Amino acid sequence: MSKNQCLQCASKNKLINLVNLGNQPWCNDYQTKKLKIYPLKVNFCNNCYGAQLSFFLKKEKMFSDNYYLSGDNIELNNHFKKISNLIKKRFSSNLGFKRKILDIGSNDGSFLYNFKKDWQLLGIEPSKKAITISKKKKIKSLKTYFNYKIAQKINTEFDVIHASGVFFHLEELISCIKGIKLLLKTRGLFIVQFINLSEIVFKNHFDQIYHEHLYYYSLNSLKKLLERFDLEIIDATKSTIHGGSTIAFISHKGIFKKTQRMIKFENKDKKNLKKFLKKTENFEDAVKLIKINFLKRINYYKRRNYSIYMLGAPAKASTIVNYFKINKSLIKKCYDINQYKIGKNVPGTKIKIYNENKIKKINSKEIFLIMSWNYKNTIIKKFRNKFGKKFKYFFPYKH
Ligand SMILES: [Zn+2]
């Protein structure tokens, strides 16, 4: 495929620079050694209004030993419960047979677990760690990457195919959609959660950009992508999960009517289009300004003899520290609860990660930089309960 071809709509020579975040290490490479770096640059498509990375790191490097476990995350689990209740409401059980659900990127089985009682489950997941946990929950899972070939092997039709937090990762996007088309029952639903590009652009969420996120969809670009396979979005809603996502409900073309909510969503998108395009033009400048303001702020605290600690080492923190060029002289330590990260360094830096639960007291000259801003409420509550007003914090940019 030509370098200047959009992978979402297949048009040629419509890609322009959205933002260049320089060369960065892989955001989930938790090591103590110096890491290899790769371009982190996003191109925007002027035809479908979606975006994609200019350079793809191999999926085998990124996902075969993933540190990310869905079960660790309360908000995500609540979100999964909500979606599963919606699905169960729509698809009646007690039919004398079991409904079938396929979860692509099923991780540790946290989503499928909600269907364990009445449904026939299948998870697809490449990460060894996650799949071991999922098997303990007795959730049938295949350790592989989903694509058309795997779909042909599975050879069963599903009432529901679900892909949450994975649809922007797929190196084999086209093959994967072909597989979904093949395995979706005539009246089945494909439910996908994705980080909406308009959310990133309007809120300057540039740290949602990292090597694991290959694609950045807009409602329009997802529509164009699905159209190529006779699939259509019949309903969509916004969710706060992963820092602002859209959940789309997709069916074979012409089977269901679009919901009122979907029509409203589309109209709003159309109305905002001009503003959105303007924002994409200025996005890189907005991001540069964030960097300048952040460094000013850090220096302000430094002058006042504060010790600054990072709170959380999610993938997005890697984008920030590497783009801002933050090192140990600016930020002393990082805290996280993920046991796989503790003892390692924040990728690309010498900032070491310590166990967050071992913070016993906070003095008046200590301040925390909250990196997982998408879970800010939970984090702030936890620390305020433990340390009261002594807990002082800030964000890498406005939240
Ligand atoms: Zn395109």
Image (cartoon, rainbow, N blue to C red):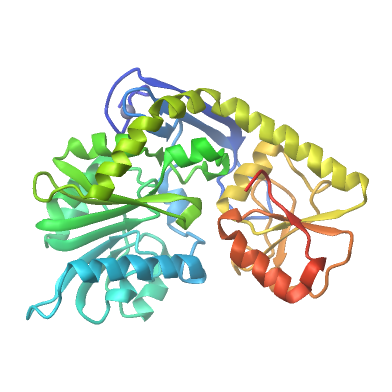
* Position in image of residue 38 (x %, y %): 55, 36
Q: Residue at x 41, y 75 (%)?
A: 133
Q: Is residue 28 visible?
A: no
Whether 269 is drawn above or below 74: the answer is above
Indicate left or right for 370 with 209 as reference.
Answer: right
* Position in image of residue 22 (x %, y %): 60, 31
Residue 342 vs residue 238, the one in the foreground: 238
Q: Residue at x 14, y 58 (%)?
A: 188
Whether 393 is drawn above or below 201: the answer is below
Q: Quadrant of residue 111?
A: bottom left
Residue 35 vs residue 121, the one in the foreground: 121
* Position in image of residue 14 (x %, y %): 36, 19
Indicate left or right for 71 with 338 as reference.
Answer: left
Residue 365 vs residue 348, the one in the foreground: 365
Q: Quarter of the image containing the N terminus? A: top left
Q: Quadrant of residue 390?
A: bottom right
Quarter for ligand 1? top left
Q: Quadrant of residue 159?
A: bottom left
Indicate left or right for 182 with 386 as reference.
Answer: left
* Position in image of residue 70 (x %, y %): 45, 66
Q: Residue at x 47, y 60 (%)?
A: 65
Instruction: Count the labels in the image.
Output: 0
Residue 233 vs residue 106, the one in the foreground: 233
Q: Is residue 218 visible?
A: yes
> Which residue is at the far top?
13
